[in-house]
Amino acid sequence: MQFSGSCWGKSHRTTMIAALVALAAFLGSQLLVPNGAEAQASAGEITGCYKAKGKKKKRGTLRIVPAAKKCKKKEKRISWNAAGQTGPAGPRGAEGSDSADVSIRLDALESALADALEQIELLTEQVATLEGLLAGVTNQELLDAIGAAATVGELCTAVPELADVINQVVALPILGGLVDPVGDVSCT
């Protein structure tokens, strides 16, 4: 880690290195227990050596060592308690739900899943049907068919004319009032 700028004087760097060393040591004691550190932890204190001098990349490197072992030439000894002070009790957790409530929720989820699977099966069948209908039809043929189809606007224009023709047929004396005439029809 590099520090630059005027606010990182020598004392600040030393404090930061010590804090990082302590953090690394704590994390190391939680994750790894090499070189007899387990015995040290049971005794209540953990000892380590951290690189205080040398190349910047290696400074701050921490090794956990047995209490009797000496640190290397460019290292400094550090030790800390294996266990800290006991903290205050946390807040009480939320009340758990009873198994009947969980069973009801599980039944509802299973039912919803079954419904979803039925929908998926139905949609899969519809897709297969459409694929069968469109088998052998090229994209151009499909576009030509769509282009040839009447638009909704054209159909709406034709509906009132068709209603007039139907009403003329219904009015024929041969039907004798058997069929009611079509009322006003409009597309909106």
Image (cartoon, rainbow, N blue to C red):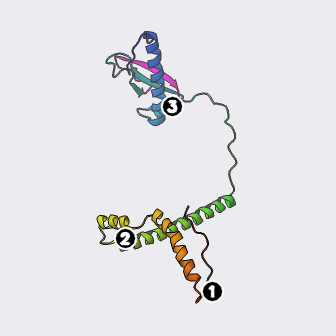
Residue 141 higher or lower than 1, as above or below:
below
Q: Indicate the position of residue 180 as horizontal and vertical percent values.
A: 63, 80
Residue ID at (43%, 24%): 48
Residue designated by label 2: 131
Camera-side residue of 183 and 26 = 183
**Mark 1 vs 3, N-terminal side:** 3
Helix, strand or loop status at disc 1: loop
Residue designated by label 3: 41
**Mark 2 vs 3, N-terminal side:** 3
Residue 70 shows up from this direction: no
Residue 98 higher or lower than 119, as above or below:
above
CB under 8 Å between callouts 2 and 3? no
Residue ID at (68%, 59%): 101
Q: Indicate the amino acid at tag 2.
A: Glu
Residue found farthest to the front: 173
Quadrant showing the N terminus: top left
Q: Indicate the amino acid at tag 1.
A: Leu
Please tell me in which quadrant of the rendered image residue 135 appears.
bottom left
Residue designated by label 1: 178
Q: Indicate the amino acid at tag 3.
A: Ala
Q: Is residue 153 left or right of residue 188?
A: left
Give the mark count: 3
**Mark 1 vs 2, N-terminal side:** 2
Helix, strand or loop status at disc 2: helix
CB under 8 Å between callouts 1 and 3? no
CB under 8 Å between callouts 1 and 2? no
Q: Which portion, as a residue range, is magenta?
A: 66-82
